[in-house]
Image (cartoon, helix red, strand yellow):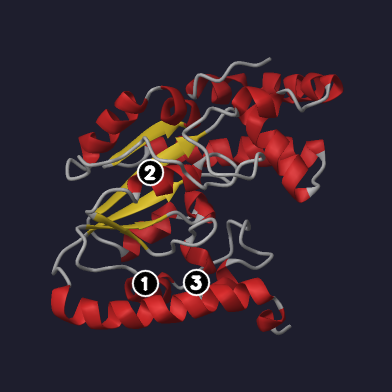
């Protein structure tokens, strides 16, 4: 399949071509010798694009992709294998040495912190740590009911699929939180309703990020399809679920109460 039949990919790749060539010159003359590598570990539909846009307001950080969902897995030469149908197969092995080489071309290496937010990183962080030194992570989770609504609406997936996917990604996040240093975890609700706490948590592991701006209009994907000030959309999303959906979710979530309790998520 020729990806350039998709005009959007062509437009994106033109941007990437220009950015990569500008950074090639800049990185020759202004690259730092040492960097901190920051990975946003977040399932889809959990607010990771919003978080990445907030972090990108700092002058000390560089993201490897500033388009759309801002994921490094969508860069040219990587998307054909990082964004294929196997990407959520935890046994699917990646060549992290190659991935790092590509990402370095799209990072502004004059910045102190180099950031990636590829969603499937939540299940591959152990492998990532083998390739990257001086590594940090922010685990992001969101009310699972709101995530289920997003999966069903935007992917036309069944309720059963959405429930199983959410529980599996929470298991990944629990493992990441319990088995890593230089890692914090925050919730989408904290980003929206307690930015002072989020700022404090971020600076706990990355004190350089003392210039974050939470007050802009952000273009992160949301069902309202327009730039917004930081707004908690959880209740609106949950209200879109049917009563029968809520009952089925409760049935399955009750079997995983300890997992939900770990993140302080209530069963409705």
Q: Is residue 243 left or right of residue 126?
A: right
Residue holding disc 1: 106
Q: Is residue 202 left or right of residue 97?
A: left
SS at mark 2? helix
SS at mark 1? helix
Closer to us: 22 or 89: 22
Would you say residue 120 is visible in this rendering? yes
Marks 1 and 3: in contact by CB < 8 Å?
A: yes
Q: Earlier in the sequence, mark 2 or mark 3?
A: 2
Q: CA distance from mark 3 to mark 1?
A: 9 Å
Q: Earlier in the sequence, mark 3 or mark 1?
A: 3
Closer to us: 46 or 218: 218
Residue holding disc 2: 54
Q: Residue at image x 65%, y 30%? A: 146
Label 1 packing within 10 angstroms: few (<14), some (14-19), many (20+)? many
Closer to us: 86 or 29: 29
> Measured along the vertical axis of the image, is residue 151 above or below residue 186?
below
Q: CA distance from mark 2 to mark 1?
A: 19 Å
| Image quadrant assignment for residue 98 | bottom left
Residue holding disc 3: 75
Closer to us: 125 or 25: 25
The location of residue 170, given as percent across then percent down, is 55, 36
């Amino acid at each position: 399949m020729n990806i350039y039949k998709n005009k959007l990919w062509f437009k994106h790749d033109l941007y990437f071509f220009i950015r990569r060539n500008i950074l090639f010159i800049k990185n020759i003359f202004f690259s730092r010798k040492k960097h901190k590598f920051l990975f946003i570990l977040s399932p889809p539909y959990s607010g990771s694009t919003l978080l990445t846009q907030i972090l990108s307001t700092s002058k000390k950080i560089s993201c490897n992709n500033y388009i759309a969902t801002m994921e490094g897995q969508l860069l040219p030469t990587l998307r054909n294998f990082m964004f294929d149908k196997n990407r959520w197969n935890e046994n699917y092995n990646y060549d992290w040495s190659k991935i790092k080489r590509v990402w370095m071309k799209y990072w502004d290496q004059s910045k102190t912190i180099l950031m990636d937010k590829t969603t499937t990183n939540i299940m591959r962080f152990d492998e990532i740590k083998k390739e990257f030194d001086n590594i940090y992570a922010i685990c992001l989770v969101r009310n699972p009911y709101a995530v289920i609504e997003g999966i069903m609406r935007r992917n036309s997936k069944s309720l059963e699929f959405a429930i199983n996917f959410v529980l599996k990604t929470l298991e990944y996040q629990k493992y990441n939180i319990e088995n890593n240093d230089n890692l914090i975890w925050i919730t989408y609700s904290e980003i929206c309703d307690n930015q002072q706490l989020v700022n404090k948590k971020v600076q706990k592991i990355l004190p350089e990020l003392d210039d974050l701006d939470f007050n802009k209009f952000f273009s992160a994907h949301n069902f309202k399809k327009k730039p917004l000030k930081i707004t908690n959309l959880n209740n609106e999303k949950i209200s879109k679920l049917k009563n029968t959906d809520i009952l089925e979710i409760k049935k399955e979530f009750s079997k995983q109460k300890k997992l939900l309790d770990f993140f302080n998520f209530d069963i409705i």
